[in-house]
Image (cartoon, rainbow, N blue to C red):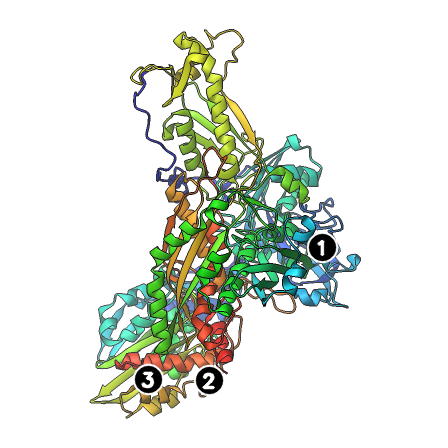
Amino acid sequence: MIPSAFDYARPSTVQEAVRILSEAGEDAKVLAGGQSLIPVLRLRLAAPSLLVDLGGIAELRGVSESGDELVIGAMTRHADILRDPLVARYAPLLAQATATVADRQVRHLGTIGGSLSHADPAGDLPSVSLALDAVMTIAGPAGERSVPASEFFVDYLTTAMQPGEVLVAVRVPKREGWGTHYEKFNRVAQAWALVGVAAAVRRENGSIAEARVALTNMGTTPLRATAVEQALAGALASADAIASAAASAAEGTSPSSDVSASAEYRTHLAKVLTRRAVAAAGGIDAA
Amino acid sequence: MTVTDERPAAEVGAARRRKEDARLITGRTMWTENVALPGMLHLAILRSPMAHARLVRVDTAPALREPGVVAAFSGRDLPAMGLPCAWPVTEDMVHPDHPALAVDEVRHVGEPVAVVVARDRASAVDALAAVDVEYEPLPVVTDMEQALADGAPLVHRDKGTNKSYTWVFDSAAAGTGGSTEEAFANAPVVLRRRYVQQRLIPSFMEPRSVVADPTGDQYTVWSATQIPHILRFLLSVVTGTPEHKVRVVAPDVGGGFGGKLQVTPEEVIAFAVAQKLGKPVKYTETRSDSLLSAHHGRDQIQDIELAADRDGKVLGLRVKLLANMGAYLGLVTPGVPLLGAFMYNAIYKFPAYRFECTGVFTNTTITDAYRGAGRPEATYAIERIMDELAAELGLDPVEVRRRNWIGHDEFPFTTVAGLTYDSGNYEAATEKALSLFGYDALREEQKRRRESRDRVQLGIGVSTYTEMCGLAPSRVLGSLRYGAGGWETASVRMLPTGKVEVVTGTSPHGQSHETAWSQIVADQLGVAFEDVEVLHGDTRTSHKGLDTYGSRSLAVGGIALVNACQKVIEKAKPVAAHLLECDVNDLEFRGGAFRVRGTPTEEPGKTLADCALAVFAAHDLPDGVEPSLDADATFDPENFSFPHGTHLCAVEVDTETGRVSIRSYVAVDDVGRVVNPLIVEGQVHGGVVQGIAQALFEEAVYDADGNLLTGTFVDYTLPSAADLPDVVSDRTETPAPGHPLGTKGVGEAGTIASTPAVVNAVVDALRPYGVNDIRMPCTPERVWRALQGGAS
Ligand SMILES: Cc1cc2nc3c(=O)[nH]c(=O)nc-3n(C[C@H](O)[C@H](O)[C@H](O)COP(=O)(O)OP(=O)(O)OC[C@H]3O[C@@H](n4cnc5c(N)ncnc54)[C@H](O)[C@@H]3O)c2cc1C
């Protein structure tokens, strides 16, 4: 479990990081918490010639407010998210999902930016970023650009970022008055989700005004369950209505079959977990 | 010398905290991986990516050009050294050669193909990529039934068969019971089931590691092994090095569970390379190497048939096993299922029994001992089918067991498998377990949930078990064609200051021998617990022993220890008599001191420490008295010991997702007298969760090409504390008769008992849905599928 040899750089600003990366070309890799990258290197599934460690860039770590948005620095650790008061107030879904990520050790090293950049469809935070309508701030040689979560995840382990680009921050619209829930189903406590469902629900009087539902591990990217969202919009806040909406949770998904679960079982789980997630988010007893 | 008048409180039975913990927990100790010697070189091993292939070419020369590389070898470059199998279970067993480093052919993924030696580990690993190997693929077989079919690809082409052996026990032939044919012919109830013991990976915490250091014609080998003594003997045999020139050290070892009861290719390769280069070398496996190539456990298909009358009395039992050997035979591979052969009849009085086991070669990693070795498999099958019998007859599962078990007044009891159970009280353990568990209340709740068609159903599982531990009477091992005996040895050395050094032939790797042995010696010799040091695992200090496995250390080694202490006291007697100026026959030894019989205990008398000092000075000893109190004892048991217990498990099953959660778990074990309840609880707890892991979580999976799909802990789902229940653990105590301490064994009990308790509970929850079995591990998907099938 020894990685191939590599060079190492530890810039102290984003600009410097971008410069080093663009000079080094495709063979360089960004290192954040290392919780996904280091295992890949140790198994020799990748052998980058240069690692650019973002750990020395102070501006990348922490959560702040900017108007209607929370701005979460890419190097904010999972453990930071769990105790951040702004996250607790405006984006509790993120904390709920982050609490299910791996174990304590991993959560003290892994970062939100690393999780999103890694774009593992089995990761918990990509689907959460979809459900929250998050927007990614990306820095590159040509300056900064913004990419919404819905366009950020393009394929298995692939994002809209180009070589030389760095994810700087995740911007999350402040949501007050929404109920949220992350429902994760895994084989053992510190394992990846077989399927996960991120749900955010805004209730008005006796009905569901709006809902956001996103799925973990139901395809090569995290997916929005749009059919469910549409069925829920304006629906009665009842167990029956939720159950009937959740029945279409697997529409448009393409889950894999592997040693942990079959596609058929994942499809079944997506429906059950969506019903449970939406009900919990909406504060409705789904029995 | 001052003497306390008080006899110290008994140590045996006290919940002493472990002596070894301070160094183990702080890491201020020696693991094999910590060994660093001047000039030491590092090995990296190239492993086959193919499950079966002819080695057309293994060219190590390019690796020699890589930085830091000192040497590189293929199987052709090293002397032929076959790995040993010590248990040829039948005369005609097919026993293929097992080269440490493959020569012409590889037969499983992970088999060593070449070794690179470099100045540092990273360079050795880097250079593996430069070794040029050409593989010519050969057909692969991983499934046992396919392997036995006509025209199946052969794992060993020269052997002409994938069958290693068939071993049969028949109670009619052995004269230990009746004929199963008759029993089945007339039985009103016959049940037939197939159970599958999935393949498991022992997953000890410390990966295996070995250092071999040649100095002149002497070799020191450090290894993370359970068996330093056996390893010394076999390294000497395999490499042709005289035994007295080989020293093996097992320093602190981080767990084994049977997984380090092996003479490994890596140990032999390290030895051979050290010998060839005349330099110390080290190899430490990665976790990936370990999961892939350290021996696996279980992997049996069990066809079991039970004949009974309508009252639930069992009339006969027939078991037909297929046991996956993997590609070769490891140290005790063929014998593992046979350890189960004597346990299928469990705690019951069955009149007729037949057992047949066929060992099968496949293109997979070898299997061998894993916690319980044969006994968990047997206990699982019988305890599962006893539940099926209860269901068939509409009886409570506990009641069916009651109708068949051996009564407490029937011991010693000779079973249909020919073993004589020493003692036990199944009634008492079961009563205690039922009441701790709240059995009746849970059955009530189960009824309510069934009636209300609750989404979450409750299941209750029971398992009663016994096991044979204290391996083993040497004569019995001989009759089973095992290559060694089963005795154990201990030495007690009295130091001049009265402190005691104990050398044990057992080799702890998590079992707390230093603590327990100190407690025993403290009571025997009347010295303080703190004044005893227990030495183990180095063949230079402990030249003799048969090491630790099969819950044998206390059951066998404990008696050797007591006997050695008794010899010390005997040797001290003439010295004490001389010091007290009395006759030897007037002496008594109590509370650590010799006194003239009848003198009050206020009298200081002469302690062992006094005697130790006297023999050290040796100025004034009676004629003919040896100036030493030290003594050795070796003990060979006449019988196994048979702990037993009753475990109860309640599970909740989410019928929508198939998720099983353990709600409560009660373990009542009878392991005879207890030396240290903390240690016993730890062993029970660890054993129970390892058994739960088999029931619900773990499985090593190969694809049809022989690739291990569960090669990391991401896919081999080892549960952690977060996935496991609190275990309520309690005991009954039926002392082992004839054992001076009355102890049995506890190392494997939890693992043996818990797997069937959990699966019985899962099946119990689902019976109303038409489900009567679920393959292990009972993953959510398997449970869900069973529910789909049962409902349709
Ligand atoms: C045992 C274990 C269990 C786990 N279980 C879970 C789980 O249940 N759920 C879950 O969601 N995750 C899980 N993880 C993954 C964990 O959340 C990781 O922390 C996360 O996926 C990666 O974050 P990181 O900061 O460690 O990134 P790294 O490993 O450092 O990087 C990951 C990838 O992202 C790239 N990258 C990182 N940061 C940036 C950036 N700012 N800009 C551009 N590219 C970047 C890297 O180049 C690399 O390709 C687990 C990890 C482990 C080790």
Residue identified by numbered label 2: A253
Q: Is residue A268 visible?
A: yes
Count residues near mark 2 (Cα–Cα under 10 Å), then give few for <14, some for 14-19, many for 20+.
many
Distance from the alpha carbon under mark 1 to that under mark 3: 62 Å
Residue A228 point in image, percent of width and height: 37, 88
Tags 2 and 3 on a common chain:
yes
Say which element carries label 2.
loop
Can you say whether A192 is above or below B13 in the image? below
* Camera-nearest residue between B710 and B641: B641
Quadrant of the displayed image that contains ligand 1: bottom left
Q: Label 3 marks which chain's residue?
A: A
Say which element carries label 1.
strand
Residue identified by numbered label 1: B165
Residue B69 point in image, percent of width and height: 62, 49
Instruction: Kindly indicate whether the residue at mark 3 contacts the one at mark 1 (C-beta within 8 angstroms).
Output: no
Residue identified by numbered label 3: A212
Can you say whether B101 is above or below A161 in the image? above
Residue B104: image quadrant is: bottom right
Residue B216: image quadrant is: top right
Distance from the alpha carbon under mark 1 to that under mark 2: 50 Å
Tags 1 and 2 on a common chain:
no
